[in-house]
Image (tube, grey):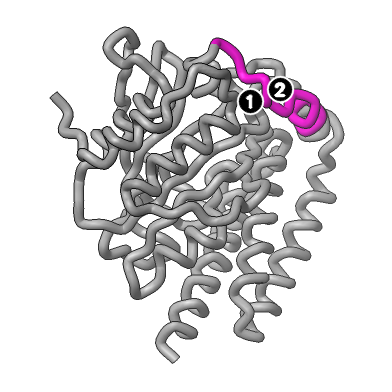
Amino acid sequence: MLRRSPHWRRWLRRKRSRGRMGSQGIALRLQEFWEAEGCSAIPSYGSLPVGGLTPDVFFGVLGRVAWCACQTVTIIDPSRAPYGVDPLHPVIDQCLQVTQQTSGNQLRDRFIESLQAVGLDLLARDVRFVACEWDQPHLDVRTSGWRVLVDRIEVGSISYLHELSGVKLAPMPTRAEYSLGRLSTCVEGEDEDAPAERGRQTAAYALESVDPERIDAFLELHAVECERALALGLYLPAYEHVLASVYLHLLLALHDTRSAGEQFERVSRTAGLARGCASKYLEAQDA
């Protein structure tokens, strides 16, 4: 039997509702659940390439003080279903990300409780934790954890962030990520808030219109601007160029015919820029 904190039980009794929530309602319930656990919501970030970290998370976990936040973000993954027609593998995925730096190791229990908070009867569902490791070479990130499946639908993941841009993190951050659309499908049978047309056009552009040479030129421009910003000590705008580069790498992966060595060199340059952002931030913290 999972241990449940008393304040969580009181919160759940207050918040249960009979009406449809949709993905936005689910996000609100999850935010309130995690706020009751001491993790406050911060403003949403907007669009983020899959595998990226928002600036709030990237610099937050690098700081000298333990950091905690709950944030909604739109994940873009052009490698997903062609033209975004599969709602369980969306090109545009509305997500809620919860990042904590605590000494506790009850992340799996809390994730299960949060699923119950949005109305999932887990005794009647097939819930599985599938162990996996994620390495994001563009940001030089090392993580491990589990994908979370409900009735074989991947509704999110929980992970431990071991290293970020050459920095070993202590205390080790934990991350819980929810796919709001897929959670809505599990809870209510469909996701009425899914941005289908945006996903279709994003996929159409990625599959049909990308010119690898032009994308490569954009990568070079972002790298130069990132280096220029870092030289001025401006790590925040520099990191935005890193995130733009991550998305360009995703587009190139669909079309690029360059050798593995050339691709590795290009990715390594972006990772080096991410390390530069981390270094400049830590220098500013120590100043």
What's the residue at 54%, 72% (across, down)?
277
**Mark 2, residue position:** 84
What's the residue at 35%, 25% (across, down)?
116
* Secondary structure state at the residue bearing disc 1: loop
Is 181 left or right of 129, judged from the image as shown? right
Question: For the view shown, which residue lies furthest in the top direction?
Answer: 124
Residue 139 lies, in percent from the top left, at 51, 57
Using the image as rendered, state which of residue 199 and residue 135 is in the foreground.
199
What residue span does the magenta drawing correspond to? 189-202
Pointers 1 and 2 in contact (C-beta within 8 Å):
yes
Q: Is residue 178 visible?
A: yes
Question: For the view shown, which residue lies furthest in the left direction?
Answer: 1
Mark 1 is on which residue type? Pro
Using the image as rendered, state which of residue 82 and residue 99 is in the foreground.
99
**Mark 1, residue position:** 90
Among the 4 quarters of the image, the one containing residue 3: top left
Is 102 left or right of 241, judged from the image as shown? left
207, above or below 247, in the image: above
Assess disc 2: are there few (<14), some (14-19) or many (≥20) residues with their C-alpha within 10 Å of its C-alpha: many
* Secondary structure state at the residue bearing disc 2: helix
Mark 2 is on which residue type? Gly
Q: Is residue 262 visible?
A: no
